[in-house]
Image (spheres, rainbow, N blue to C red):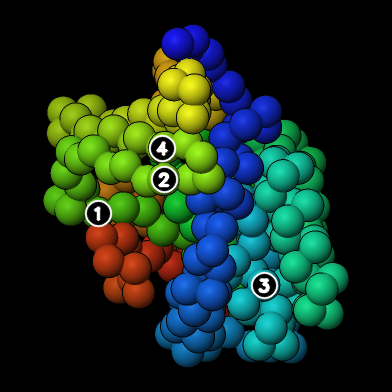
Amino acid sequence: MAVRQETWDSFWAQKLRIDFFDGQWESYHKVADARADWLERSFELDQSRPILSCACGEGGIELALAKRGFQVTGIDKSPVYIHHAREQAAQFGYPATFLTADLRDKSPLPGGNGTAMCFDTFGLLAMEEEQALIEKMRASLSPGGVLLVDCPVRADLHPGRHWWKIGAGHLLQDMRYDKASALQVCEYTFITESGDQIVLADPYDRTRGHHTGVHRYIYDPDELAAMVRTTGLESDPAPHQRKGYAMVVGREAAGGVV
């Protein structure tokens, strides 16, 4: 039995976010539709104003919002995700555009947005890269726009091991959380039909050194809100539709200009 390491682009993007949902896409879209409905109602999103989604992945929420009539632009660095999202948008005729780009580069984001959002991502990059991303998201907003980011709730994080059958193989996920460092570690191993093991080795934050799996700093919601406030927006945590998560909302101050 061989053991090898693969990156997101070479193997894991397809395995974890596309193959994983094979046979479950109907349930997947129901969850995405419910979250899109909640976002529109909870944050009074205006269908006449564009939405920008950073780290959009395979485009579940983005396509659900486009289905509701929003003009959506999604950005992700994974060609696998963007290809899937584009195919879905074309198939159903949704008003959504998906772009392949690394959010860590210095290029500005598409502007004129009523909403700029980034979900289930903060804590994966170096803190200075995330601060720069927050600033770029803020700069992409039109006057009166809203910035939305989220994070897991530390108290709800627990160690665990989970197995799933995917195709002819099996996926093992090992999760642990270190309270002292506020670092969550998720190790992924795919075991093929022949018994070979494929592990994930593609760290987002290279300042954390070489490692396998995903290492994510878990922000306290007030800490993430403070980061948003450095851009001049008012920001506070808010309830999240997803269990075990908190939303952080940034808006311009009354009488202010974004």
Please name which of the two marks, 2 or 3, marks the residue nearer to the observer.
2
Q: Closer to the camera, 168 or 258?
A: 168
Secondary structure type for disc 2: strand
Q: CA distance from mark 1 to mark 2?
A: 28 Å
- Observer able to see residue 108: no
Residue 58 lies left or right of residue 125; in this view the side is: right
Q: Closer to the camera, 66 or 130?
A: 66
Residue 58 lies left or right of residue 254; in this view the side is: right
Mark linked to residue 171: 4
Q: Amino acid at mark 3?
A: Leu
Q: Residue at x 72, y 87 (%)?
A: 69
Q: Residue at x 23, y 38 (%)?
A: 161
Q: Amino acid at mark 4?
A: Leu
**Pointers 1 and 4 in contact (CB under 8 A)?**
no
Q: Examine the image and state in which quarter residue 89 appears.
A: bottom right
Q: Earlier in the sequence, mark 2 or mark 4?
A: 2
**Pointers 2 and 3 in contact (CB under 8 A)?**
no
Q: Residue at x 49, y 79 (%)?
A: 30
Quadrant that contains the N terminus? top left
Mark linked to residue 217: none
**Pointers 2 and 4 in contact (CB under 8 A)?**
yes
Secondary structure type for disc 1: loop
**In the rendered view, would you say 173 is above or below 59?**
above
Q: CA distance from mark 4 to mark 3?
A: 27 Å
Please name which of the two marks, 1 or 4, marks the residue nearer to the observer.
4
The residue singled out by tag 1 in the image is: 153
Q: Closer to the camera, 223 or 179?
A: 179
Q: Earlier in the sequence, mark 1 or mark 3?
A: 3
**Pointers 1 and 2 in contact (CB under 8 A)?**
no
Query: Residue placed farthest to the front in the image?
Result: 194
The residue singled out by tag 3 in the image is: 63
The residue singled out by tag 2 in the image is: 165
